[in-house]
Image (cartoon, coloured by chain):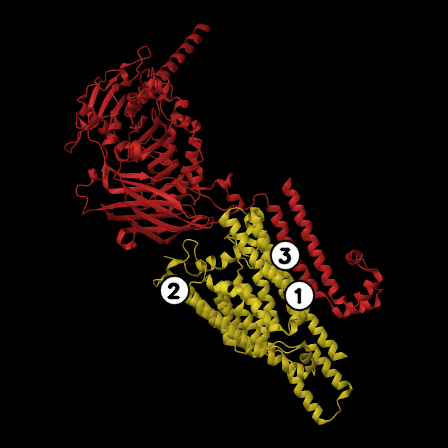
Amino acid sequence: MAPTRARATIHTSFLLLLLVIFLSCDLLDRIIASSGEASEEEFTEELLLKPLPDKKILAHFHFQSTVPPSDSIGHHHHLFPKAIAQLVKKFHIRELELSFTQGRWNYESWGGSDPMSNINAKPPGVEMWAVFDLPVNDINESWKGLTHALSGIFCSSVNFLESSTAYSAPHWGLRTNSSSMRYGALPREAVCTENLTPWLKLLPCRDKAGLASLLDRPSIYKSYYHSQRLQLFSSDASGIILDQTLTVVLQPNVQRNGMPNSYDRFLQPNWSIMSMFKKKVTGQCALAKASSIFIELEDGLATELEKLGAGESWNNLAFDLSVAPDRVIKEHNSMEGKSSSILYEFKVVKYSKYEPLDVGIKWKLPLVWSCPEAPFHARRFLMGSGNERGSIAFSLQPTQSRDQFLSDSHKCTVRAVIFQVVPWYVKVYYHTLQIFIDGRSVPVVDVVEKISVSPSEDKVSPGSLQMMLRFPCDMNSTALAMDFDKGFLHIDEYPPDANQGFDIPSAVVSFPDFYSSRSYLEGNCLKHPPLLLKLQKRTVLQSYTEVLLVPLTTPDFSMPYNVITFTCTVLALYFGSLLNALRRRIGEEERLLKSKDSKQVGLIPRLLSKLKGRTLESHQSSSGSTASSKPGAKWLFKVIFVAIFAVLWHYYSNID
Amino acid sequence: MSPYSGSMYHGSPLLLPVLGPLTVNRVKGLPAHLFCSLIFVIVDFVTAMLIRATGQKLMSTYHRSLQLLNLSCVQETAGHTHVGDLASLIFLWNPFTIITCAGSSTSPIDNLMIVLSIYGACSGLSSLASFGWVVSTHLSLYPAILVIPVILLLGYGPDAPPSKLFFLKKSNESGGSCPKDKTCSEQKSKEESHIRNFCWRPVLFFILWSLIWSSYILFLSFISLKEFGGLSEMVKKTHGFILNVEDLSPNIGVFWYFFAEVFEFFRSFFLIVFHINILFMLVPLVIRLRHRPCFLAFVYIAIMSMLKSYPSVGDSALYLGLLGLFANELAEMRFSFFLLCGYVGISLLSPVMHNLWIWRGTGNANFYFATGIAYASLQTVLIVECVSTILKHDRMLRNKLTT
């Protein structure tokens, strides 16, 4: 019996095995199929380094993840962050941009018109906008959910943008017509490493390998400006494209031997990746499709090099690159008589842990150049004193590069679009808009081509202003001023340090007549890495103004109990004494007084009489004539006594 | 654009097309609000004239009723002031009135409507009284409580000594002094006609007219706000704004600071308490002062201007002007010097404290709030003293009649 049973068990186990094999084959098929799909999920990493005219270095990290359109978005991903995919799916996002910025972009010395600064310069704090693919009524709900989700993902207070006082719906001021856009900014948000860590978690290699491993926290947060950004495009045709960029402006350590002399003072600092990030590149992220480092020399610098006759080679008489570049890409410039920027590309794939890449530049000759500035420089400031009212002023001033943008600067006009959101407690009187061109007041209708205003509503919505101006190109200054009243808030609505003031978010000033783009003609256009494709995109020139700090009047924060008691005391006095006056029957009282023995005298009259040095009897004799005024005097004394007591009490409670 | 978009305007939609253009049209070399201020000066002048007319009516009625009581001696001993002239002069020369005009506040229009309603009620013109009452209620909600004195005025006629005194006199006369002949009974019947009965006719007219005027005003508002949310929006942004005390900007009252400081979960409780406080005193005052509806109206206006959510000096200007109407009765008021000094002191200190706090940043909100508290206390003292003096006056009349 035993062998037959054993055979039977072997038989069944064989069958089971077969079943398992079949099943696993099926699974394998599926896995292969899904991995075939997943092979289209792509990830690329790039780093662009660029010397700036004021001896600082711009480092721009660019990570791009893409996912093709499929049904499995939000369910299963190989490279693409699942959290983001689920966000896109749940909230029906078309486009999204979220930036965390610390520091202010210096438009004068770091550039304003090249694509790099045009795209990556962001206002301080948090800025977020999103375009939804939803009917108009559902957008606000979706925005609220999105802010909460993002604040959870990025460990930040983006959820403050949820309240309707914090966001607005620009129709045409920020981008082209879209009614399904929401825009919000938190200018005071502090950005720190706790925001960077979740941002890095979205990368397939995190900061363990590849270019992201260069993100050394101390050197990033020591920088003059750093802006960490997340940009998302989603469409049915192309799936989801997620761009994560980190822009840092660093000051390289100057290590020079010997005494500084005048020659050295103009010399650019030498730097390398090691000196800036305390690390070397030890190979690319294994999951990345492409990984490269670029060094860009902008056109101003290229012109200087050309003047010196240095050429494009990587070790010329002006500077030495520490590593030979794999490719030199030159910008194709349509304009005559202007040299174009140069890009040196280094492929990270060739390097490894044993042969790390440490790109650097060593300057031999002092070079002075200027950055490409925007044609007009937009600034914003506050006017007036006191805490009751003030005015906001914008000024647009031409920069030196205006003539480069305008062929005939005498007969033309320039358009500028201003988009400004003000919190409700800054109550702007939009009708007081005044415009001055070259110091002379100009009628508003002559300059403003299009304006749309949505006034702020107390504790409900912020005010927003979208305005298109058209002014002559040859003006030397344009100024706009609007008056506002400052609101008074409830004690709970003030931030912890109320006397510091409140921040008004940056205004966005864009110039629809001017575009910034780079064009690289070499090779196949589509084969360019994503960063270069990004730089090639034609974008409208725009710049952010400064954040304004508005001081508001503060109540006394230590007073709530005192105010409640004082006010209620006054009301009780009113109520009690009026009711007493109405209730009192004087006739009966007089009768009572007559019947009563009038020897009883109040405490205060007795004290008074003692003070006056009179005897009680003489006072009593005279009290008959002043009987009518006595209760009133008593009452008054009581009021004064209570008031004195209250004042003393308040004084001593405040001393504590 | 809706006039209520943007929390800037909380007035009536009907006031805006009248006053709006005046603030915008600018003549070179003149300040922008000059025309607006001029309008307010005219409005204030009309108000003063109406107060004068009301005062004359009051005087004649009171004189007549005293004669009926054979108490003309009271007038002779107490002195005889033309209260109408006095009140209108007090109103016109009050610094508060002048400041209100210079600051182009809209309170002169509210004041005119309130005075119009009292004048109309005094002279028995139901339509005028109801017009004033409806418009002033529409403009600032609180004058709604004036419906009680207005109805009493229409029903009983202007102020008189308590009706009890007339009965007392009648019983005295019938008790002995008057011989029982025909002339006496004739006189008695004549006097009885002067003992005032509540006549319903003008009151019914008043109610009818009020319905007509309010539907007319609502209709006009509806037309002007048809595209912007209609009447519900208007009620929310005008009367709702008054009741909710949403704006916490400093004013001469105490509630702005109270609601800026009070804890959020107590807010609705205190809102109810403060507004009930106005309504609470209505009934006791009516019981004691129903024979003096004009004085009742004055007390109501004073209480209103003390306890309203956004008080202004324009409201004080009105009740201080009306105070002059009762100069004869209130001649014996106590603390009048103290009150005068208080008013002068507060009106000097309050702007100083405001300036120190808001403009210079050296002061504290508490300093300004202290002036507000003191002002509220002063008003309390004034109201209580006025009421007790009037009651004392009536008592004095009664004493004169019985002895």
Q: In this view, does A200 lie above or below A423?
A: above
Chain assignment, label 3: A
- Name chain B's colour: yellow
Q: In this view, does B396 lie to the left or right of B375?
A: right
Query: Label 2: few (<14), some or many (≥20) within 10 Å?
Result: some
Q: Which of the labelled discs sits on residue A571, or is there none?
A: 3
Report whether residue A169 is seen.
no
| Residue type, mark 3 in image | Leu
Task: State the count of labels.
Answer: 3
Tell me the subunit letter for badge 1: B
Q: From what the image shows, is residue A22 above or below residue B250?
A: above
> Circles 3 and 2: CB distance less than 8 Å?
no
Q: Mark 1 points at which residue?
A: B385
Q: Is residue A569 visible?
A: yes
- Asked if labels 3 and 1 touch by Cβ distance under 8 angstroms, the answer is no
Camera-side mark, 3 or 2: 2
**Can you tell which chain is drawn red?**
A
Query: Which secondary structure, mark 3?
Result: helix
Q: Nearer the viewer, residue B141 or A259?
A: A259
Secondary element at image label 1 = helix
Image coords of residue A523 (percent x, y): 17, 25
Res. B22 mark: 2
Query: What label sits on residue A516 in the rendered view?
Result: none
Give the letter of the chain under mark 2.
B
Task: Say if labels 1 and 3 share a chain.
Answer: no
Q: Mark 2 vs mark 1: which is more N-terminal? A: 2
| Residue contact at pointers 2 and 1, CB within 8 angstroms | no
Mark 3 Cα within 10 Å, few/some/many (few <14, many 20+)?
some
Find residue A597 and report its horizontal and vertical position in percent.
Answer: 85, 64
Vertical comparison of B185 with A301: above or below: below
What is the CA distance from the residue labelled 2 to the residue labelled 1?
42 Å
